[in-house]
């Protein structure tokens, strides 16, 4: 992860960012639990403490990751291809409703 100056909180001088915010790829790795380097993880977590924009993006990314995980489970348990499609759509709709009631 590249480092640059964080402009969303003047008290933080250097955190892992792209143009002041966390890279999408790094948010995905974080939400998937694939970020294992402690210094990288610490920088990302510190940035999330000061940047509401990145917090919102992280929440949206986590919602997407969760939806894909649930959809994968539903698809494996469904009996037919059409059932799989309908079940996947229903799961995505339910997750969307939970996020924005």
Image (cartoon, rainbow, N blue to C red):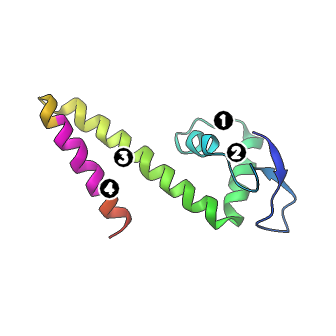
- Split into 4 quadrants, where in the image is the C terminus? bottom left
Name the spot of residue 17 as percent of width and height, x first. Answer: 75, 50
Q: Which residue is found at the position 64% from the left and 37% from the top?
A: 35
Disc 3 element:
helix
Indicate which label's residue lies in the foreground, 3 or 1.
Answer: 3
Mark 2 to mark 4: distance in Å? 27 Å
Mark 3 to mark 1: distance in Å? 23 Å
Question: Which of 19 and 47 lies nearest the eye of the viewer?
Answer: 19
Image: 19 above or below 68: below
Query: Mark 4 vs mark 3: which is more N-terminal?
Result: 3
According to the picture, the residue beneath numbered tag 3 turns out to be: 67
Answer with the quarter of the image where residue 52 lies: bottom right
Name the spot of residue 9 as percent of width and height, x first. Answer: 79, 68
Disc 2 element:
helix
According to the picture, the residue beneath numbered tag 2 turns out to be: 41
Asked if residue 89 is among those painted magenta in the image, a careful observer would answer: yes
Q: Of all residues shown, which one is farthest toward the front?
A: 19
Name the spot of residue 80 as percent of width and height, x first. Answer: 12, 29
Q: Main secondary structure of the magenta part?
A: helix
Q: Are marks 4 and 1 in contact (CB under 8 Å)?
A: no
Name the spot of residue 79 as percent of width and height, x first. Answer: 12, 29
Query: Mark 1 vs mark 2: which is more N-terminal?
Result: 1
Disc 1 element:
loop
According to the picture, the residue beneath numbered tag 1 turns out to be: 36
Q: Which residues are magenta?
A: 84-94
Q: Are marks 1 and 2 in contact (CB under 8 Å)?
A: yes
According to the picture, the residue beneath numbered tag 4 turns out to be: 95
Query: Mark 4 vs mark 1: which is more N-terminal?
Result: 1
């Amino acid at each position: 992860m590249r480092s640059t100056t964080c402009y969303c909180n003047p008290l933080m001088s250097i955190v892992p960012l792209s143009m002041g915010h966390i890279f999408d790829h790094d948010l995905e790795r974080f939400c998937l639990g694939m970020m294992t380097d402690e210094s990288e993880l610490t920088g990302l977590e510190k940035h999330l403490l000061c940047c509401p924009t990145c917090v919102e993006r992280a929440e949206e990314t986590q919602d997407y990751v969760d939806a894909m995980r649930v959809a994968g489970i539903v698809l494996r348990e469904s009996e037919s291809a059409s059932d799989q499609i309908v079940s996947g759509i229903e799961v995505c709709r339910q997750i969307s409703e939970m996020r924005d009631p």
